Amino acid sequence: MENTRMQWNQLLSGVRLRDRQVKDRTKDNEYDLRNDFDDDYTRLVISSAVRRLQDKAQVFPLDNSDFVRTRLTHSHEVATIGRSLGISVEKYLHKQKPNVFQEESVGKLSALLAVAGLVHDLGNPPFGHFGEAAIQKFFQEWFNKENVKKLTSTAPQNAKQMQADFENFEGNAQSFRLLTKLNGLVDEYSYNLSVASLASILKYPRSSLEGNKNKKERQEKKLGVSYKKFGYMTSEQDRFELVREYTGILQFRHPATFLLEAADDIAYSAADIEDGCKKKVLDYSIITDVFAEFFESEEEKYLLESFRKDYKQNTEERRSDRLDNAVQKLRIKAQGLMIHEVVKTFLCLHDQILNGEFDNEILACSKAAKVREAFQTLANKYIFPSQEIITRELVGWKVIRGLLEIFVSAVSSDNIYDVKELERDIFKIHGEFARSEKGKNFMLISDNYRYLMQRYPFSIQADKSPSLYDRLLLVTDFVCGMTDTYALELYQKLSGIKL
């Protein structure tokens, strides 16, 4: 079946939103023979947004261990696994379906997945998914009748979707916003990435009203996994539409997104138990008991027996790191098995994916599904409920909520701007307000984010100042850009706990 809805040559488009065309790098440098996604990776890997991931939690917030993974190390692992998946898929497709996946596309899919893996968590707030939940809960309480009325008065047509952007706040949507707008080095096009790179991170190509369907709703309405959350804010809807147009994904996920999701699952599911052992949350008996419960196939049983054998050998050799060593070997073998099965399953489903007929998780549909499920059970049952994680998550909840209370209060004031001054000086705020506590808090927000809001607002009020929606986005942009440590220290300072 080669007459598909989506076509690889368009799916791997290097068109960039600023110029609406593919950049010819050889015009400026005849020796620059990188593909568009190699270029994207270079732009991103040296960026401050990626660097900040080194102090954002993967599982253990505010951890000072040099072994436990951060969002940065996790992202590099996802990029590496994604690239491996891409290499296998593109070479097989070109060999078996040269008319579908042409020679000039070989090398692009693997480079694209390296980009997607590097930035897939870029918009996550401090303290991981608990930080997301804190933002959601804050705004669900903040949007009372009065505040909803304020929002509606400046954008009556989009008010419900704007409200849903915050009440269902999602790190994936924040990643898309960051990559398409929030790096103000040149203009409002941020890193000016290729449309394929932007499409690949859209795990949920839905608005905040279309997505956010729980499992029961999805089953009743026969909706796939792409409706589980949402992928873009109202403020970036026009850019989402352009990405969709240039890549030809229509209303579906980009095929690379299925591989990105699998790479993410493969990376964290096995790595979490490695970190859990290092933190003394798991022991040998817990791991073997859970594996024995889930593993049934020959490949799965081989993993369990191999783990037992390695642990026994380490014990006989009197290794003090007997469990850590055996688990690291297990992680390598388990990830190898999952990678193999994901490639195999993706290729089997290839035509359905390109036709938009498949909307599920590749790993969940593969023969390695039980492996991932066993690892997730260990994490959910023993790692995440550990006292250390719960304590630090509660601290994170209080920090995020405290920062939101301070800065949302500042930006929601009606007298922030002196519009006459604003026309002459983009950083000018109302003199009386500037001297108040709220005004001083407002001025603590990153200059870059304030500049972008005031220079490129999504919507404006009757007096030509940025709308309440823009100002609320300013706060979530600022908070999500913080590292765990910076968020904690800023909250402590503003609360008078620490100078």
Image (cartoon, grey):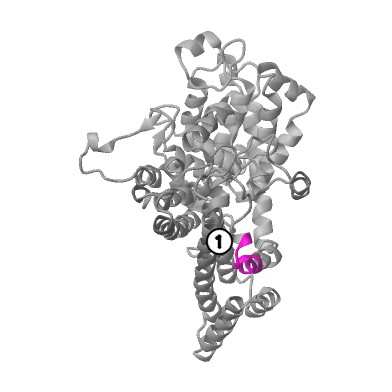
**In which quadrant of the rendered view does residue 418 lie?**
top right
Residue drawn where x is 58% and y is 77% of the image = 299
Judged left or right of residue 481, residue 469 is right
Judged left or right of residue 469, residue 25 is left
Judged left or right of residue 130, residue 75 is left
Q: Is residue 45 visible?
A: yes
Q: Is residue 192 visible?
A: no
**In which quadrant of the rendered view does residue 237 lie?**
top right
> Looking at the magenta stretch, what is its main secondary structure?
helix
- The picture places residue 61, in percent across and down from the top left corner, at 59, 55
The answer to whether residue 367 is magenta is yes
Q: Which residue is mark 1?
A: 345
Where, quadrant-wise, is the C terminus in this rendering? top right
- The picture places residue 291, in percent across and down from the top left corner, at 65, 75
- The picture places residue 2, in percent across and down from the top left corner, at 49, 48
Start and end of the magenta stretch?
A: 365-375
The answer to whether residue 34 is magenta is no
Residue nearer the viewer, 417 or 338: 338
Mark 1 closeness class: few <14, some 14–19, many ≥20 residues within 10 Å: some
Compared to residue 481, the image places residue 267 above or below, namely: below
